[in-house]
Image (tube, rainbow, N blue to C red):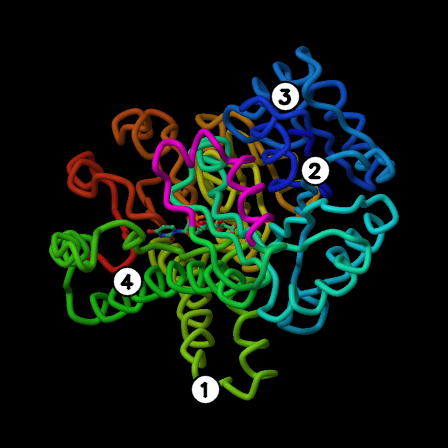
Amino acid sequence: MRLSVIGCGYLGAVHAAAMASIGHDVIGIDVDPRRIESLTRGEAPFFEPGLQDLLTEGLQYGRLRFSTDVANAAGAAVHFIGVGTPQQPGGDAADLTFVNAAVDSLLPHLSEGDVVAGKSTVPVGTAAELAPRVSAAGATLVWNPEFLREGWAVQDTIDPDRLVAGVPSGRDGERAAELLKDVYRPAVDKGTPFIVTDYATAELVKVAANAFLATKISFINAMAEIAEVTGADVTQLADAIGHDVRIGRRFLGAGIGFGGGCLPKDIRAFAARAEELGRGESVNFLREVDAINLRRRDRAVELVVEGLGGSVYGKKVAVLGAAFKPHSDDVRDSPALDVAVRLNGLGANVVVTDPQAIENARRLHPQLTYEADRDETIRDADAVVLVTEWDEYRRELTPDHASTLTDGRVVVDGRNGLEASAWRAAGWQYYGMGRP
Ligand code: UGA
């Protein structure tokens, strides 16, 4: 099928490349000429495992093209909207400027029977508001939320665990759902659940999923806070409750909490939308989820201060990680970088390393010192702080090797990823999050 994807950020670029890889003829559109130039050269504009290969392949076989001109979307049967919905400056609600602009720019290029499929994460009610504009152009709007995880985006797009389509009632809606099924044919034929529902449910499925994941992380981090005053170990607690299949162990990783371009802004936008709807109290707990999450960053800083005897001033602190999670170069609302910035603010000589995110981190926080080499980062450090659990730091860095690089013997494990007993046995003072 011919498809267009409006917006070539994390979501759109991966979607475009993945759709081309399953055999569609795809044009990706973005207003940023630099991004389009880079994609046209076959260069992924950000680090996402597998994306580079899909781009090369799609461009080579002529199934994938990119353009800054939305007129080139004309002729596609399905037009995906994958632009960002960031947090409004000075508020919690989602900023829909880009969604509105994308839809408006597309309208003159739609043909009778086209489907416009919104993938961006939007406040419930957005699709119903956009639908009349799309219908007036002879097309049908569907809401098709995306559940991809950064770092696994290609796999999650090609082989998702479920597909959701919010469609209008009646023939147009039924037809649009069938068309969308054709787009995702390989996954549908494999038996992937394909849930056809109304707009509001589709929009809510997305924010509810992210709200649940954020709540799960903050739940275990709240347990970590209790563990810290009782001498309990939150990682053992998570293992033990995780054996209950109703609870499950995934997303019970206590540490410095969640960040990134999605969970933090999505829970805030959800709370803001619920308030607009007069149901603020229903999701008031999300404010608490947010507060617990942010407190864990303070806790990591406190542990470094404690480990260094009450002050970090003038001490070298090696910060392992800048990305908001491993397998990503994304530093948006990164807890790792936030911890580094706070330590720097306390007068520490902070050196940050990361296998992928240094460039992005430097752009955001040029005041920090960056070092590409892990061992050079650790060399002569008074404290080592693990904040993004890349394998290079979590699995491959042994305490014995670290001991050859520095006489400092303080390690703060902001992701509970290190083997505490091994580090202690090697003479290090080990501090975990919610662990004795
Ligand atoms: C999240 C959702 O997981 C995706 O399903 C969703 O599609 C996406 O947002 C989105 O809305 O676009 P992502 O932001 O890529 O995906 O990252 P996650 O894997 O959810 O991790 C979020 C944060 O939680 C990271 O900072 C991670 O380090 C942290 N985390 C995760 C924990 O602190 N503990 C855990 O146990 C798991």
Q: Give how far across and how far down residue 97 sits, in percent.
A: 77, 61
Which residue is denoted by mark 4 in the rendering?
Answer: 220
Q: Position of residue 413 (x, y in %)?
A: 33, 47
Tag nearer the camera, 2 or 3 = 2
User: Which badge, 3 or 4, comes first in the chain's sequence?
Assistant: 3
Query: Could you tell me which quadrant the N terminus lies in?
Result: top right
**Residue drawn where x is 65% and y is 26% of the image:** 44
As rendered, which of 215 and 362 lies closer to the eye? 215
Q: Are marks 1 and 2 in contact (CB under 8 Å)?
A: no
Is the residue marked by circle 2 packed among few (<14), some (14-19), or many (20+) residues within 10 Å?
many
- Of residues 51 and 254, the one nearer the viewer is 51
203 inside magenta stretch: no
| Label 1: how many Cα within 10 Å (few below 14, some 14–19, many 20+) | few
Q: Is residue 176 above or below residue 85?
A: above
Q: CA distance from mark 2 to mark 3?
A: 22 Å
Q: From the Cβ of disc 3, is ligand 1 less than 8 Å away?
A: no
Q: Is residue 305 visible?
A: yes
For the record, the magenta segment spans 174-194
| Amino acid at dot 3 | Leu
Q: Secondary structure at mark 3?
A: helix
Which one is earlier in the sequence, the residue at label 4 or at label 1? 4
Please report contact status of discs 2 and 3: CB closer than 8 Å, yes or no.
no
Residue 277, position in %: x, y? 57, 83
Front of the two marks 4 and 1: 1
Drawn side of residue 6 relative to residue 411, left or right = right
* Residue drawn at x 45%, y 59% as measured from the top left: 210
Nearer to the camera, 109 or 225: 109
Q: Which mark is residue 77?
A: 2
